[in-house]
Image (cartoon, rainbow, N blue to C red):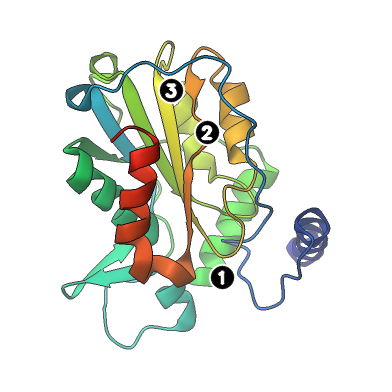
């Protein structure tokens, strides 16, 4: 199946699932907004000193001026500094919880061009690839609670997140997800992670925010954290 045919098929499928049109939306951020019914086990009490925030984020530019529409969609500018949308949310969570941040990065240098990045994300997904990561968490045993954040690419979590989940031991841990998107919410990824991390407690009420609402992210993150006892 060619990329163009694949894109058309996925776009139609997402529209059927979500019950909405997808015109004008990027395939690096559109899908359905289903969520899990709830964790199978009660989460442990949260110890802020034993909490980590791991995130994957891919801003398509570092230049705050003269952005294209695609570059604006993938970024949020704070005090003149360009942050990826997911990176910004991770920092907001970190500021409010005092937790350590860990950025998930691939060994392969990712393209900044939107079309090239979109094609790479689709090629990874079609091949069920596990991109190699630049670094690993050396002390994962030190954490009881791990926030995991990512944008939605091609109606799924990016394949580097699969690598991250499979390379680390989450047994007995509480996992809290957060996503940024272009119209899709959590896009079924709570169920995906819950199935993959069967020995962990994956909370159903993950945080999700549209790229169009990033100016409201601080308040939305604050309110959401109250629901997960922060």
- Label disc, if present, on residue 72 of the rendered structure: none
Residue 160 in the image, given as x and y percentages of width and height: 48, 40
The reply to whether the C-beta atoms of the residues labelled 2 and 3 are less than 8 Å apart is no
* 48 lies left or right of 224: left
Mark 3 closeness class: few <14, some 14–19, many ≥20 residues within 10 Å: few
Q: Is residue 198 above or below residue 216?
A: above
Which quadrant does the C terminus fall into? top left
Mark 2 closeness class: few <14, some 14–19, many ≥20 residues within 10 Å: some
Question: Could you give the CA–CA distance between mark 1 and mark 2, rounded to whole angstroms?
Answer: 22 Å
Q: Is residue 207 above or below residue 51?
A: below
Question: Could you give the CA–CA distance between mark 1 and mark 3, rounded to whole angstroms?
Answer: 29 Å
Mark 1 closeness class: few <14, some 14–19, many ≥20 residues within 10 Å: some
Q: Which residue is mark 1?
A: 115
Q: Is residue 130 above or below residue 126?
A: above
* 219 lies left or right of 167: left
Nearest to N terminus: mark 2 or mark 3: 2
- Element under label 2? helix
Q: Residue at x 16, y 38 (%)?
A: 98
- Label disc, if present, on residue 167 of the rendered structure: 3
Q: Residue at x 24, y 51 (%)?
A: 91
Q: Residue at x 37, y 56 (%)?
A: 220
Q: Which residue is mark 2?
A: 162
> Of residues 32 and 223, which is closer to you in this image?
223
- Element under label 1? helix
Which quadrant does the N terminus fall into? bottom right
């Amino acid at each position: 199946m060619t990329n163009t045919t694949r894109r058309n098929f996925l776009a139609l499928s997402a529209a059927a699932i979500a019950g909405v049109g997808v015109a004008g939306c990027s395939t690096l951020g559109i899908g359905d907004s289903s969520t899990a019914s709830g964790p199978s086990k009660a989460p442990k009490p949260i110890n802020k000193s034993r909490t980590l925030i791991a995130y994957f984020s891919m801003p398509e530019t570092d230049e705050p001026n003269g952005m294209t529409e695609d570059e604006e969609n993938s970024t949020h500018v704070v005090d003149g500094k360009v942050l990826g949308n997911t990176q910004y949310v991770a920092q907001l969570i970190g500021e409010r919880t005092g937790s350590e941040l860990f950025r998930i990065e691939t060994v392969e240098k990712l393209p900044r061009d939107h079309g090239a990045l979109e094609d790479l994300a689709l090629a990874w997904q079609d091949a069920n690839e596990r991109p190699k990561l630049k670094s690993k968490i050396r002390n994962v045993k030190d954490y009881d609670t791990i926030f995991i954040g990512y944008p939605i690419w091609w109606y799924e979590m990016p394949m580097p997140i699969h690598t991250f989940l499979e390379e680390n031991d989450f047994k007995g841990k509480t996992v809290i997800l957060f996503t940024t998107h272009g119209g899709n919410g959590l896009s079924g990824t709570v169920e995906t992670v819950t199935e993959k991390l069967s020995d962990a407690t994956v909370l159903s009420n993950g945080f999700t925010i549209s790229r169009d609402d990033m100016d409201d992210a601080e308040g939305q993150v604050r309110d959401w954290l109250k629901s997960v006892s922060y």
